[in-house]
Amino acid sequence: MSFDRVAIIGLGLLGGSIGLAVQDALPGVVTTGYDADAATRTRARERGLCAHIFDSAAEAVRDADLVIFCVPVGAMGAAAGEVAGAIKPGAIVSDVGSSKESVAKALAEALPGATIIPAHPVAGTENSGPDAGFASLFRNRWCIVTPPEGAAPDHVEAVSAFWSALGANVEVMTPQHHDLVLAVTSHLPHLIAYTIVGTASDLEGVTQSEVIKYSAGGFRDFTRIAASDPTMWRDVFLSNKDAVLEMLQRFSEDLTALQRAIRVGDGAQLFDHFTRTRAIRRSIIELGQDDARPDFGRSDHGSAES
Ligand code: NAP
Protein backbone atom coordinates (compact mmCIF):
# COMPACT_ATOMS: atom_id res chain seq x y z
CA MET A 1 0.00 0.00 0.00
CA SER A 2 1.40 3.41 -0.94
CA PHE A 3 0.01 6.92 -1.16
CA ASP A 4 -0.73 9.00 -4.28
CA ARG A 5 -2.13 12.08 -2.60
CA VAL A 6 -1.12 13.37 0.84
CA ALA A 7 -3.07 16.12 2.63
CA ILE A 8 -1.34 18.21 5.31
CA ILE A 9 -3.45 20.13 7.82
CA GLY A 10 -1.40 22.82 9.62
CA LEU A 11 1.45 24.37 7.61
CA GLY A 12 3.93 25.39 10.29
CA LEU A 13 7.32 23.84 11.02
CA LEU A 14 6.15 20.22 10.85
CA GLY A 15 3.50 20.51 8.13
CA GLY A 16 5.73 22.67 5.93
CA SER A 17 8.67 20.31 6.35
CA ILE A 18 6.53 17.30 5.39
CA GLY A 19 5.24 19.12 2.30
CA LEU A 20 8.76 20.02 1.18
CA ALA A 21 10.18 16.59 2.06
CA VAL A 22 7.45 14.75 0.11
CA GLN A 23 7.99 16.93 -2.97
CA ASP A 24 11.72 16.20 -2.67
CA ALA A 25 11.71 12.48 -1.88
CA LEU A 26 8.42 11.33 -3.46
CA PRO A 27 7.96 13.52 -6.54
CA GLY A 28 5.11 11.34 -7.86
CA VAL A 29 2.97 12.06 -4.79
CA VAL A 30 0.56 15.04 -4.93
CA THR A 31 0.64 17.25 -1.82
CA THR A 32 -2.33 19.31 -0.69
CA GLY A 33 -2.45 21.59 2.34
CA TYR A 34 -4.56 23.79 4.55
CA ASP A 35 -3.87 26.05 7.54
CA ALA A 36 -6.44 27.86 9.66
CA ASP A 37 -4.49 31.11 9.33
CA ALA A 38 -4.96 32.96 6.00
CA ALA A 39 -1.55 34.67 6.27
CA THR A 40 0.08 31.26 6.78
CA ARG A 41 -1.70 29.91 3.68
CA THR A 42 -0.41 32.85 1.64
CA ARG A 43 3.15 32.32 2.84
CA ALA A 44 2.84 28.56 2.28
CA ARG A 45 1.83 29.20 -1.34
CA GLU A 46 4.79 31.58 -1.80
CA ARG A 47 7.19 28.98 -0.42
CA GLY A 48 5.55 26.09 -2.32
CA LEU A 49 5.13 24.05 0.85
CA CYS A 50 2.51 21.92 -0.98
CA ALA A 51 1.56 21.63 -4.63
CA HIS A 52 -2.02 22.77 -3.86
CA ILE A 53 -3.08 24.88 -0.89
CA PHE A 54 -6.81 25.23 -0.27
CA ASP A 55 -8.89 27.70 1.70
CA SER A 56 -10.81 24.96 3.50
CA ALA A 57 -9.68 21.79 5.25
CA ALA A 58 -12.44 19.75 3.59
CA GLU A 59 -11.17 20.66 0.10
CA ALA A 60 -7.59 19.86 1.10
CA VAL A 61 -8.40 16.31 2.28
CA ARG A 62 -10.74 15.43 -0.62
CA ASP A 63 -9.32 12.40 -2.54
CA ALA A 64 -6.24 12.22 -0.27
CA ASP A 65 -5.25 8.69 0.75
CA LEU A 66 -3.11 9.97 3.64
CA VAL A 67 -4.21 12.90 5.82
CA ILE A 68 -1.67 14.20 8.35
CA PHE A 69 -2.68 16.62 11.11
CA CYS A 70 0.23 18.94 11.95
CA VAL A 71 -1.51 21.32 14.36
CA PRO A 72 -0.81 21.84 18.09
CA VAL A 73 -1.82 18.83 20.19
CA GLY A 74 -4.71 20.73 21.79
CA ALA A 75 -6.14 21.63 18.36
CA MET A 76 -6.11 18.08 16.89
CA GLY A 77 -9.74 17.29 17.77
CA ALA A 78 -11.10 20.55 16.33
CA ALA A 79 -8.97 20.25 13.17
CA ALA A 80 -10.15 16.66 12.62
CA GLY A 81 -13.77 17.70 13.27
CA GLU A 82 -13.54 20.13 10.33
CA VAL A 83 -12.91 17.31 7.87
CA ALA A 84 -15.34 14.72 9.23
CA GLY A 85 -17.33 13.49 6.26
CA ALA A 86 -14.83 14.82 3.70
CA ILE A 87 -12.17 12.13 4.06
CA LYS A 88 -12.12 9.50 1.32
CA PRO A 89 -13.24 6.03 2.48
CA GLY A 90 -10.16 3.85 3.03
CA ALA A 91 -7.81 6.82 3.57
CA ILE A 92 -5.36 6.68 6.47
CA VAL A 93 -5.44 9.49 9.02
CA SER A 94 -2.24 10.32 10.88
CA ASP A 95 -0.68 13.18 12.84
CA VAL A 96 2.68 14.39 14.15
CA GLY A 97 1.66 15.34 17.71
CA SER A 98 4.29 15.25 20.43
CA SER A 99 2.04 13.28 22.81
CA LYS A 100 0.19 10.26 21.53
CA GLU A 101 -2.44 8.77 23.83
CA SER A 102 -4.56 11.92 24.11
CA VAL A 103 -4.19 12.79 20.41
CA ALA A 104 -5.25 9.28 19.32
CA LYS A 105 -8.34 9.65 21.51
CA ALA A 106 -9.17 13.13 20.12
CA LEU A 107 -8.80 11.94 16.50
CA ALA A 108 -10.89 8.81 17.09
CA GLU A 109 -13.67 10.85 18.71
CA ALA A 110 -13.71 13.41 15.89
CA LEU A 111 -13.49 10.82 13.09
CA PRO A 112 -15.44 7.73 14.14
CA GLY A 113 -14.75 4.75 11.89
CA ALA A 114 -11.64 6.30 10.29
CA THR A 115 -8.38 4.35 10.00
CA ILE A 116 -6.06 6.22 12.37
CA ILE A 117 -2.33 5.45 12.57
CA PRO A 118 -0.67 8.21 14.65
CA ALA A 119 3.03 9.02 14.44
CA HIS A 120 5.55 11.37 16.03
CA PRO A 121 8.64 12.43 14.12
CA VAL A 122 11.17 13.19 16.86
CA ALA A 123 12.61 16.10 14.90
CA GLY A 124 12.14 19.80 15.30
CA THR A 125 13.66 23.15 16.03
CA GLU A 126 12.65 26.02 18.29
CA ASN A 127 11.16 27.83 15.27
CA SER A 128 7.54 27.67 14.20
CA GLY A 129 5.29 28.95 11.42
CA PRO A 130 5.32 28.66 7.62
CA ASP A 131 8.88 29.96 7.26
CA ALA A 132 10.34 27.40 9.65
CA GLY A 133 9.99 24.20 7.59
CA PHE A 134 12.76 22.56 5.54
CA ALA A 135 12.89 19.35 3.51
CA SER A 136 15.70 17.63 5.41
CA LEU A 137 14.15 17.98 8.89
CA PHE A 138 13.41 14.26 9.23
CA ARG A 139 16.62 12.88 7.75
CA ASN A 140 18.34 10.47 10.14
CA ARG A 141 15.83 11.34 12.89
CA TRP A 142 13.48 8.89 14.55
CA CYS A 143 9.81 8.70 13.74
CA ILE A 144 7.73 6.77 16.26
CA VAL A 145 4.57 5.19 14.88
CA THR A 146 1.96 4.41 17.56
CA PRO A 147 -0.82 2.28 16.06
CA PRO A 148 -3.92 1.51 18.13
CA GLU A 149 -4.44 -2.06 19.30
CA GLY A 150 -5.61 -4.26 16.44
CA ALA A 151 -4.40 -1.93 13.66
CA ALA A 152 -3.95 -3.70 10.31
CA PRO A 153 -0.26 -4.46 9.70
CA ASP A 154 -0.38 -3.13 6.14
CA HIS A 155 -1.65 0.24 7.41
CA VAL A 156 1.19 0.44 9.94
CA GLU A 157 3.63 -0.61 7.23
CA ALA A 158 2.32 2.07 4.84
CA VAL A 159 2.78 4.90 7.38
CA SER A 160 6.21 3.52 8.36
CA ALA A 161 7.30 3.33 4.71
CA PHE A 162 6.13 6.93 4.17
CA TRP A 163 8.36 8.17 7.00
CA SER A 164 11.29 6.02 5.85
CA ALA A 165 10.97 7.62 2.41
CA LEU A 166 11.35 11.05 4.06
CA GLY A 167 14.64 9.86 5.57
CA ALA A 168 13.48 8.94 9.08
CA ASN A 169 14.34 5.81 11.06
CA VAL A 170 11.04 4.29 12.12
CA GLU A 171 10.17 2.60 15.41
CA VAL A 172 6.73 1.24 16.34
CA MET A 173 5.49 1.33 19.96
CA THR A 174 2.31 1.76 21.97
CA PRO A 175 1.08 5.32 22.60
CA GLN A 176 1.46 4.78 26.36
CA HIS A 177 5.10 3.74 26.06
CA HIS A 178 5.79 6.63 23.68
CA ASP A 179 4.37 9.12 26.18
CA LEU A 180 6.54 7.77 29.01
CA VAL A 181 9.76 7.76 26.94
CA LEU A 182 9.15 11.24 25.52
CA ALA A 183 8.26 12.60 28.94
CA VAL A 184 11.85 12.02 30.02
CA THR A 185 13.70 12.66 26.74
CA SER A 186 11.80 15.71 25.56
CA HIS A 187 9.05 17.04 27.81
CA LEU A 188 11.02 17.16 31.08
CA PRO A 189 14.07 18.81 29.44
CA HIS A 190 11.78 21.50 28.02
CA LEU A 191 10.22 22.08 31.43
CA ILE A 192 13.68 22.34 33.01
CA ALA A 193 14.83 24.78 30.31
CA TYR A 194 11.72 26.93 30.74
CA THR A 195 12.37 26.93 34.51
CA ILE A 196 16.08 27.79 34.38
CA VAL A 197 15.67 30.58 31.86
CA GLY A 198 12.79 31.99 33.92
CA THR A 199 14.82 31.76 37.13
CA ALA A 200 17.82 33.53 35.58
CA SER A 201 15.71 36.33 34.17
CA ASP A 202 14.06 36.86 37.57
CA LEU A 203 17.38 36.98 39.50
CA GLU A 204 18.03 40.13 41.40
CA GLY A 205 21.67 41.14 41.63
CA VAL A 206 22.52 39.64 38.22
CA THR A 207 21.74 41.92 35.34
CA GLN A 208 20.06 40.84 32.09
CA SER A 209 23.17 41.93 30.21
CA GLU A 210 25.37 39.65 32.34
CA VAL A 211 23.04 36.70 31.75
CA ILE A 212 23.32 37.28 28.01
CA LYS A 213 27.06 38.08 28.03
CA TYR A 214 28.10 34.92 29.89
CA SER A 215 25.43 32.65 28.41
CA ALA A 216 27.96 30.35 26.67
CA GLY A 217 28.67 28.83 30.09
CA GLY A 218 25.73 26.46 29.53
CA PHE A 219 22.76 28.79 29.83
CA ARG A 220 22.69 29.45 26.08
CA ASP A 221 21.75 25.85 25.30
CA PHE A 222 18.79 26.08 27.66
CA THR A 223 17.65 29.33 26.04
CA ARG A 224 17.39 27.60 22.66
CA ILE A 225 15.00 25.01 24.09
CA ALA A 226 13.14 27.62 26.15
CA ALA A 227 12.47 29.61 22.94
CA SER A 228 10.18 26.82 21.70
CA ASP A 229 6.60 27.61 20.74
CA PRO A 230 4.48 28.45 23.83
CA THR A 231 1.22 27.08 22.37
CA MET A 232 2.78 23.79 21.38
CA TRP A 233 4.44 23.23 24.74
CA ARG A 234 1.48 24.33 26.83
CA ASP A 235 -0.54 21.67 24.98
CA VAL A 236 2.16 18.99 25.36
CA PHE A 237 2.31 19.38 29.16
CA LEU A 238 -1.47 19.41 29.53
CA SER A 239 -1.94 16.39 27.26
CA ASN A 240 0.86 14.23 28.68
CA LYS A 241 0.22 15.25 32.28
CA ASP A 242 0.52 11.87 34.04
CA ALA A 243 3.79 10.80 32.43
CA VAL A 244 5.34 14.26 32.89
CA LEU A 245 4.35 14.39 36.57
CA GLU A 246 5.79 10.89 37.11
CA MET A 247 9.13 11.89 35.53
CA LEU A 248 9.15 15.19 37.40
CA GLN A 249 8.79 13.30 40.68
CA ARG A 250 11.78 11.09 39.85
CA PHE A 251 13.77 14.11 38.71
CA SER A 252 13.06 15.95 41.98
CA GLU A 253 14.27 12.94 43.99
CA ASP A 254 17.50 12.73 41.96
CA LEU A 255 18.01 16.48 42.28
CA THR A 256 17.57 16.23 46.04
CA ALA A 257 20.22 13.47 46.15
CA LEU A 258 22.71 15.66 44.25
CA GLN A 259 21.83 18.65 46.44
CA ARG A 260 22.64 16.54 49.48
CA ALA A 261 25.94 15.33 47.95
CA ILE A 262 26.97 18.96 47.44
CA ARG A 263 25.93 19.94 50.97
CA VAL A 264 27.81 17.09 52.67
CA GLY A 265 30.79 17.38 50.30
CA ASP A 266 30.34 13.90 48.77
CA GLY A 267 32.66 14.40 45.77
CA ALA A 268 32.67 10.69 44.94
CA GLN A 269 28.91 10.67 44.42
CA LEU A 270 29.06 13.75 42.20
CA PHE A 271 31.96 12.30 40.20
CA ASP A 272 30.22 8.93 39.70
CA HIS A 273 27.02 10.61 38.63
CA PHE A 274 28.73 12.91 36.12
CA THR A 275 30.74 9.99 34.72
CA ARG A 276 27.53 8.04 34.09
CA THR A 277 25.84 10.98 32.35
CA ARG A 278 28.90 11.64 30.18
CA ALA A 279 28.58 8.09 28.79
CA ILE A 280 25.03 8.86 27.66
CA ARG A 281 26.28 11.84 25.65
CA ARG A 282 28.84 9.56 23.95
CA SER A 283 26.12 7.06 23.01
CA ILE A 284 23.98 9.81 21.46
CA ILE A 285 26.92 10.91 19.29
CA GLU A 286 27.74 7.31 18.31
CA LEU A 287 24.13 6.89 17.16
CA GLY A 288 24.50 9.99 14.95
CA GLN A 289 21.87 11.95 16.91
CA ASP A 290 24.12 14.95 17.64
CA ASP A 291 27.30 16.72 16.69
CA ALA A 292 30.51 15.60 18.42
CA ARG A 293 32.38 18.83 17.71
CA PRO A 294 33.16 21.04 20.69
CA ASP A 295 30.33 23.46 21.44
CA PHE A 296 28.02 21.49 19.07
CA GLY A 297 30.06 22.67 16.08
CA ARG A 298 29.07 26.29 16.60
CA SER A 299 31.16 28.87 14.84
CA ASP A 300 31.57 32.27 16.45
CA HIS A 301 28.58 33.48 14.47
CA GLY A 302 26.12 30.66 14.09
CA SER A 303 24.76 27.43 15.45
CA ALA A 304 25.05 23.87 14.19
CA GLU A 305 21.43 23.94 13.10
CA SER A 306 21.64 26.65 10.51
P1 NAP B 1 3.53 25.45 14.20
O1 NAP B 1 4.77 25.79 13.44
O2 NAP B 1 2.96 26.45 15.15
O3 NAP B 1 2.39 25.06 13.14
C1 NAP B 1 1.09 24.69 13.49
C2 NAP B 1 0.14 25.33 12.50
O4 NAP B 1 -1.18 24.78 12.67
C3 NAP B 1 -0.02 26.85 12.71
O5 NAP B 1 0.13 27.52 11.47
C4 NAP B 1 -1.44 26.97 13.24
O6 NAP B 1 -2.04 28.20 12.90
C5 NAP B 1 -2.12 25.83 12.53
N1 NAP B 1 -3.41 25.45 13.12
C6 NAP B 1 -3.82 25.54 14.42
N2 NAP B 1 -5.07 25.04 14.53
C7 NAP B 1 -5.44 24.65 13.28
C8 NAP B 1 -6.63 24.05 12.75
N3 NAP B 1 -7.69 23.75 13.51
N4 NAP B 1 -6.66 23.76 11.42
C9 NAP B 1 -5.63 24.05 10.62
N5 NAP B 1 -4.48 24.63 11.06
C10 NAP B 1 -4.39 24.91 12.39
O7 NAP B 1 3.72 24.10 15.03
P2 NAP B 1 4.68 22.85 14.75
O8 NAP B 1 5.96 23.04 15.46
O9 NAP B 1 4.68 22.55 13.29
O10 NAP B 1 3.89 21.72 15.55
C11 NAP B 1 2.81 21.02 14.98
C12 NAP B 1 2.64 19.69 15.67
O11 NAP B 1 3.86 18.96 15.56
C13 NAP B 1 2.32 19.79 17.16
O12 NAP B 1 1.32 18.86 17.49
C14 NAP B 1 3.62 19.42 17.84
O13 NAP B 1 3.39 18.77 19.08
C15 NAP B 1 4.25 18.48 16.83
N6 NAP B 1 5.72 18.41 16.82
C16 NAP B 1 6.45 19.56 16.93
C17 NAP B 1 7.84 19.49 16.94
C18 NAP B 1 8.68 20.75 17.07
O14 NAP B 1 9.85 20.66 17.42
N7 NAP B 1 8.13 21.91 16.84
C19 NAP B 1 8.48 18.25 16.78
C20 NAP B 1 7.71 17.10 16.62
C21 NAP B 1 6.31 17.19 16.63
P3 NAP B 1 -2.03 29.39 14.02
O15 NAP B 1 -0.60 29.76 14.20
O16 NAP B 1 -2.87 30.44 13.39
O17 NAP B 1 -2.65 28.80 15.26
Image (cartoon, rainbow, N blue to C red):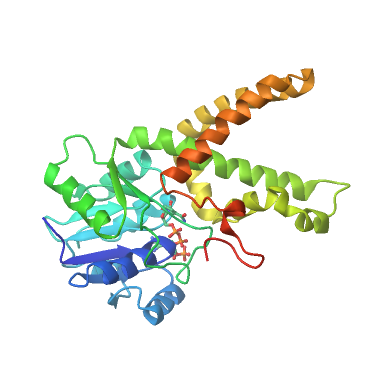
> The N terminus appears in which quarter of the rendering?
bottom left
Q: Residue at x 68, y 47 (%)?
A: 218
Q: Residue at x 30, y 64 (%)?
A: 8
Above or below, 2 against 186 in this view is below
**Residue 188 lies in quadrant:** top right
Q: Position of residue 62 (x, y in %)?
A: 19, 67
Report ligand 1 position as a quadrant: bottom left
Q: Residue at x 70, y 47 (%)?
A: 198
**Residue 176 lies in quadrant:** top left
In the image, is 192 to the left or to the right of 102? Answer: right
Q: Nearer the viewer, residue 109 or 167?
A: 167
Q: Nearer the viewer, residue 270 or 104?
A: 270
- Pick out the residue farthest to the bottom: 46
Q: Residue at x 78, y 20 (%)?
A: 265
Q: Could you tell me how many numbered marks the image carries?
A: 0
Q: Position of residue 178 (x, y in %)?
A: 37, 37
**Residue 50 lies in quadrant:** bottom left
Q: Position of residue 60 (x, y in %)?
A: 26, 69
Residue 300 in view in this figure: yes
Residue 252 in view in this figure: no
Q: Position of residue 111 (x, y in %)?
A: 24, 50
